[in-house]
Amino acid sequence: MDADVIVVGGAVAGGAVANAFGSLGVRTLLVEKVEREVHSTRGDLLHPPTLALLDRWGVLADLHADGALPIDKLAVSHSRRGRIAEFPTAAVDDGPAGRTLAVPHDRIEAVLYECALSWPSVSAQRGVVTGVVRDANGRVDGVRVRTHGANDETELQAKLVVGCDGSQSMVRRALGISAQPEQYDHEQIIIGGEGPTELPAALHWYLDEIGRVCVVSRPRGGFRILLTLPLGERGDLLRLPDPALHEYLVGRFPALTPLRFRKTDAHLYRLFRQVADRFWAPGVALVGDSAHTTHPAGATGMSLAISDAARLADRVAPLLLAGAPSDKIDSALSAYDEERRPAALAAVEANHLQALRLWQSDLFLEPDAYAQAVDPAGNWGAGGAGWGADPGALAFTGRG
């Protein structure tokens, strides 16, 4: 065996899996593409239950050292009425994992990757995974990899392959596992930039008669703007030269005037949700977007992936370290599926309902009702759980 665990994909889910197994001393090989597209405008919020897992793996201290920004408020303002509401986000405790953190997505990926490689049992290989390898009984026991600049493929063997290769997962498709995407009637333009946000450490929704945008504070004077529009209504907004996009947003919301961004800082995202029919096959587990893709409205996508990684390692690592036979490992993978798939269904549905409330309804025309919808004390998670609750545990506490 080249490793006990081969992780396909080195973004958030893959980095979390490598840290989860590496922290327990399991021989883990992380395989990542030579070049990975990085959009720093992607999700950047990590909540206290997830931070506690990262603290267990020694990652949290590095995130703080990298400049993580604790988020202390959720707020709503109106173009004519001014500030409608301002809610504090409750801290779990005074420790480093006590409050939701904002960290640019590419920095989360980088820190997870660097921390994973600090474990003696973890190594990495750059290359593209082109398929899975099966033994004589049909159980997956490895992958085929093409390294950068090579024409030939190499087979790597492991007792467990973990697919962390995104919503279009090759690993999932190679296993014949179905995941039916359900698209939304809206899309998001997500814009990154620099400049002082009106509230220095907050998620701040701005409403007018046209719709809403959300501004998320980021470390080092950065921000992320979420501009959500019905499908087909963005028109020439992203075709016109600078400063058209800036002028459009500032024209609607003058409070955004100090924010600096250009058209090249904006990325368009088509939104959908999906949950795979299964999260495992003999010799394989799916983690993160390869297993479930969720609307970002609930701000729990990364948290769900990281808690997947933790639960998979908790179940499987002791068996790998003990040299357990394949049937015992596969029984643990089945148990992982029985736990995580209902949890993902609960979390994805909760995020879906929040997306309909905040982004796909006319609720923005009722600013006070909109403010109630973003109150961190409720309506964010499964079973009405509040902002920042662990999306992976809700299905097992009677609240999901």
Image (spheres, rainbow, N blue to C red):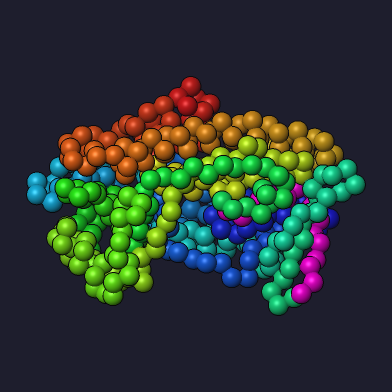
Question: Could you say which quadrant of the image residue 260 lies in?
Answer: bottom left
Q: Position of residue 325 (x, y in %)?
A: 85, 39
Q: Position of residue 45 (x, y in %)?
A: 40, 50
> Over which residues does the magenta segment extend?
151-166
Q: Residue at x 35, y 58 (%)?
A: 189
Is residue 305 shown above or below 27?
Answer: above
Seen from the viewer's position, the closer of residues 178 and 35 is 178
Q: Residue furthest right?
A: 136
Q: Depth check: 379 or 293 in front?
A: 293
> As drawn, is 383 to the left or to the right of 56?
left
In which image quadrant can residue 138 be found?
A: top right
- Say whether residue 361 is left or right of residue 392: left
Residue 346 vs 243, above or below: the answer is: above
Left of 216 or right of it: where is 279?
right
Residue 233 location in percent, x, y?
A: 30, 55
Q: Judge whether residue 389 is colored magenta.
A: no
Count every numbered label the image shows and give the total: 0
Q: Residue furthest top?
A: 398
- Residue at left offset 53%, top offset 26%: 396
Image: 144 above or below 21: below
x and y percentages locating residue 254 in the rendered image: 14, 60
Task: Please identify the quarter of the rendering in which residue 255 is found.
Answer: bottom left
Which residue is found at the position 49% from the left and 42% from the top? 182
Q: What residue is drawn where x is 73% and y is 68%? A: 146
153 falls in the magenta region? yes
Q: Is residue 205 visible?
A: yes
On the question of residue 119 being in view, the answer is: no
